[in-house]
């Protein structure tokens, strides 16, 4: 019997046929079992559930009606917020009911005073006089500070007002804002608060870009192109932005005009050919050339570029990354640039390679640096990785020394500071 005849007999055997059911049939049976379609009455009546539903586009009339309803709700809720006159009334009531004669800064209220004021004020004040709020603000003596309580109310009103204002730009009613929508909000805010945002009209669009990018850098690290409004309001970035109302001239506040002008000035100074973009060679002059060559090469591989040049938005992201190496979002981005092998961790050879790049630059400028073997061992000791000789993002965040570790690998100032530590 030939091998072909023998093979045909095996294939024609019913047991073999049953054993070798088609791959498609096996997958179908498995899927039916997985999805619970084992009932004979619905044996052949199953399908993969739909997970994506394309959003219908509104007509022009629907958009107008939606916008009108937004403004109607906005007006109604806005009218229920405490006005400046209401806040004056609250402040007077708090000061008059205080149980001591100290200055306004040190005046305090007992719970009895607190409830008495609540009973005397109109209904619109009631939500700010709950027992929960009192106990949250209460000190060790059982009293609350008048000034602390008043500041709490003011911030609460500001939070609600901002939430209300932002919702007007959420035209899809999703609870999220795209970068374009958020920039529209900032543009209108600048126009409404000229006493805080005093700037040249030509600089306005650059300021809006600088401000918006910080929100999206920290609140949209996965680059989905949108940020959650509630998360925005609860973020430390918003707290920094809100701080402008108290001190608009704080040069250390990213959102101050002075800070924004500094960032914009750096970009203009780097753009030596005046084409509005930053090349790899131009970026090497950033901060007087303190960053290692291999790190900058990797930046241009990981950051979005156009014809191998970086635009203003990408430069802002780079600026935020290198100046916030203690924050998880910046750590993750810097880590991607350091991960030469793309394996999700930094091995000793990779760490050594980065150190050598910075070492060569510093030797060139006359610095005396310690042996690479010693510094690499120290870096791994600082990171304290869970897996020996593998530094991961989680290790850098967990150890609390990411700023120092990353600084030593990419920034000559960081390495020099480490060398000269006491």
Image (cartoon, rainbow, N blue to C red):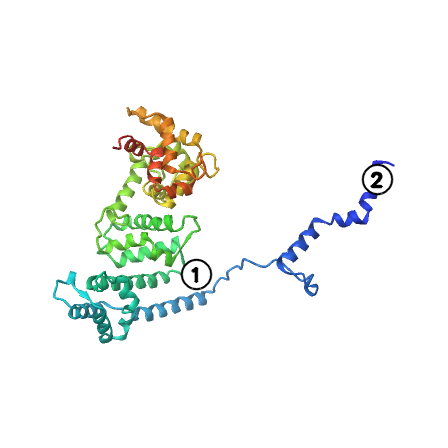
| Side of 58 relative to 282 (left or right) | right
User: Residue 292 is drawn in which quadrant?
Assistant: top left
For label 2, the SS is: helix
Q: Which mark is residue 241?
A: none
Q: Residue furthest front?
A: 141
Cβ atoms at labels 1 and 2 below 8 Å apart: no
Q: Which mark is residue 6?
A: 2
| Side of 28 relative to 268 (left or right) | right
Q: How many marks?
A: 2
Within 10 angstroms of label 1, few (less than 14), some, or many (20 or more) residues? few
The front one of 210 and 49 is 49
**Residue 333 coordinates in the image, percent (x, y):** 40, 42
The front one of 264 and 99 is 99
Separation (CA) of disc 1 from disc 2:
66 Å
Classify 416 as above or below 163.
above
**Residue 289 coordinates in the image, percent (x, y):** 31, 32
Q: Is residue 306 visible?
A: no
Q: Is residue 257 visible?
A: yes
**Residue 364 coordinates in the image, percent (x, y):** 31, 24
Residue drawn at x 15%, y 63% is 104
Q: Quadrant of the N terminus?
A: top right
Residue drawn at x 34%, y 43% is 326
Residue drawn at x 29%, y 39% is 266
Residue assigned mark 1: 174
Classify 213 as above or below 71.
above
């Amino acid at each position: 019997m030939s091998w072909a005849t023998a093979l045909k007999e095996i294939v024609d055997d019913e047991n073999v046929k049953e054993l070798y059911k088609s791959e498609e049939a096996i997958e179908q049976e498995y899927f039916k079992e997985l999805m619970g379609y084992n009932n004979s009455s619905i044996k052949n009546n199953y399908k993969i559930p739909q997970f994506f539903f394309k959003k219908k586009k509104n007509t022009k009339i629907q958009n107008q009606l939606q916008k009108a309803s937004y403004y109607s709700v906005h007006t109604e809720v806005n009218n229920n917020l405490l006005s400046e006159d209401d806040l004056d009334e609250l402040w007077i009531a708090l000061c008059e009911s205080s149980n001591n004669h100290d200055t306004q800064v040190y005046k305090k209220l007992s719970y009895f005073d607190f409830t008495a004021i609540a009973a005397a004020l109109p209904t619109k004040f009631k939500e700010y006089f709950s027992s929960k709020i009192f106990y949250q603000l209460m000190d060790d003596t059982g009293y609350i500070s008048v000034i602390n309580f008043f500041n709490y109310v003011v911030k609460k009103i500001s939070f609600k007002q901002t939430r209300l204002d932002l919702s007007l730009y959420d035209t899809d009613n999703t609870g999220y804002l795209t970068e374009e929508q958020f920039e529209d909000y900032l543009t209108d805010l600048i126009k409404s608060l000229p006493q805080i945002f005093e700037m040249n009209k030509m600089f306005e669009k650059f300021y809006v870009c600088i401000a918006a990018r910080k929100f999206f850098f920290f609140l949209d690290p996965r680059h989905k192109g949108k940020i959650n409004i509630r998360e925005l309001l609860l973020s430390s970035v918003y707290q920094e932005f809100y701080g402008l109302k108290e001190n608009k001239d704080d040069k250390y506040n990213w959102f101050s005009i002075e800070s924004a002008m500094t960032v914009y000035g750096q970009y203009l100074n780097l753009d030596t050919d005046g084409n509005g973009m930053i090349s790899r060679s131009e970026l090497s002059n950033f901060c007087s050339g303190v960053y290692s060559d291999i790190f900058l090469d990797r930046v241009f591989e990981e950051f979005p570029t156009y014809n191998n040049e970086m635009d203003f938005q990408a430069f802002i992201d780079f600026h935020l990354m290198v100046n916030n190496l203690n924050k998880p979002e910046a750590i993750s981005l810097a880590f991607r640039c350091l991960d030469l092998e793309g394996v999700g961790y930094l091995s000793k050879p990779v760490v050594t390679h980065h150190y050598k790049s910075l070492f060569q630059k510093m030797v060139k400028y006359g610095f005396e640096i310690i042996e690479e073997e010693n510094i690499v061992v120290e870096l791994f000791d600082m990171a304290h990785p869970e897996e020996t000789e593998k530094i991961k993002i989680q290790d850098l965040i967990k150890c609390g020394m990411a700023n120092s570790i990353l600084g030593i690998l990419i920034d000559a100032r960081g390495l020099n500071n480490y060398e000269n530590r006491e």
